[in-house]
Image (cartoon, rainbow, N blue to C red):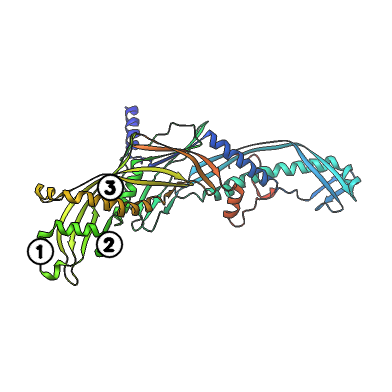
Amino acid sequence: MALFGALFLALLAGAHAELPGCKIRITSKALELVKQEGLRFLEQELETITIPDLRGREGHFYYNISDYDGGYINASAEGATIRTALQLSRDPTGRIKVSNVSCQASVSRMRADFGGTFKKVYEFLSTFITSGMRFLLNQQICPVLYHAGTVLLNSLLDTVPVRSSVDELVGIDYSLLKDPAASTSNLDMDFRGAFFPLTEGNWSLPNRAVEPQLQEEERMVYVAFSEFFFDSAMESYFQAGALQLSLVGDKVPHDLDMLLRATYFGSIVLLSPAVIDSPLKLELRVMAPPRCTIKPSGTTVSVTASVTIALVPTDQPEVRLSSMTMDARLSAKMALRGKALRTQLDLRRFRIYSNQSALESLALIPLQAPLKTLLQIGVMPMLNERTWRGVQIPLPEGINFVHEVVTNHAGFLTIGADLHFSKGLREVIEKNRPADTRAPRASGAPPPSTADV
């Protein structure tokens, strides 16, 4: 009975777990690249270690070496062993963070060459000086690494977008849904991957799409997007009132204006002379949020809109001539450029029909080709101008995607790519370094054994 209860609770918790709209897998190839870049950064951080004043006693001698006045010491560490690991987690805002740095470090021996006025004195005390320097160095290595991970690397991760605006209408939420999952070869992260209207910050769309799956490991990084990712974008723009277009007067192409007036000539001649020559108005309004369908054969977007044709006389109510429904299907091609996911749309299928009768639908057949041309020439470029701007993928500053390849699956698509460091870690960290974050000195830092800080 207890087993059944535990299983029921697990199923209940799983039923309410939020599905990711976006997943990212960082493979071993990328981890090795990041490791090499990180080692260069840590080497530079370790170079900032300074040895404080040395004081001690040897027999009847008391020594106090301060800033090495009166001579110089060229010291080198040998047999250095450093083992460190980062623990990544999700913070309360959904941002990825370095939550802990484990460290074990030791320098087995040091060599020192002395010179200057007090060379003989230094050489006499060499054993004690190098032992003291090794002790102090051992004390400082782990605090420097801990500071580099929990402060400096976190300042780099702070450049990863969590909730940010895409444009003046819509934002995107890349909150982590759980802690990153690390294995021997990959680092997997689940993101909410949901758009929202900026005027409704708490608005959310239930995710009922297929959960994206990541199996590939050939490229450095794989990003997966479910249909929900794109549906939430289109619903957000719909909620923001962006999916409508009104063309009046000179904005209506001349040939289409003439064709529309000829088509509705019978209705127009029955109007008063003051209205007959009024400007023509063509209004397209999406009736419901478009929907995305991802199949192995490609990605399509289905749109249903109303088309209203009217005359708009000056200082008088508009005169509606016709209202019809338009069904369109667009093909969508995705690409990664730099750090942006971009979409290119193309009109594939188009038809219009009357809401009134089948007979009126037949009368609309001559308008089919001109309206499709209007969409291809006048509307699609405006849509693509917006979608080709792209939306940023959650990567830190200074890292871009290159050599991408797109693969469609049933209900989701994946984009594999390699990583390119357009900026070094130090350059990005120095740019975003918080104030007063210099590495702590040995006296104020955790001791080397604090692997569970």
| In this view, 423 is above or below 107 | below
| Neighbour tally class for label 2: few under 14, some 14-19, many 20 plus, Cα within 10 Å | some
Left or right side of 32 for 243:
left
Contact, CB < 8 Å: mark 1 with mark 3?
no
| In this view, 138 is above or below 316 | above
Q: List x then y, in percent, for residue 153.
A: 57, 47
Q: Quadrant of residue 32?
A: top right
Contact, CB < 8 Å: mark 1 with mark 2?
no
Q: Secondary structure at mark 3?
A: loop
> What residue does disc 1 label?
269
Sequence-earlier tag: 1 or 2: 2
| Residue 290 tag number | 3
Residue under the image location 83 percent in, 46 percent down:
73
Residue under the image location 19 percent in, 56 percent down:
259
> In front here: 384 or 440?
384
Sequence-earlier tag: 1 or 3: 1
Of marks 2 and 3, the one in the foreground:
2
Amino acid type, callout 1:
Val
| Neighbour tally class for label 3: few under 14, some 14-19, many 20 plus, Cα within 10 Å | many
Sequence-earlier tag: 2 or 3: 2
Q: Quadrant of residue 143?
A: top right
Of marks 1 and 3, the one in the foreground:
1
Task: Tell me if I can see residue 244 in this picture.
Answer: yes
> What residue does disc 2 label?
251
Q: List x then y, in percent, for residue 146.
A: 61, 44
Amino acid type, callout 3:
Pro
Picture quarter with the C terminus: top right
> In front here: 370 or 413?
370
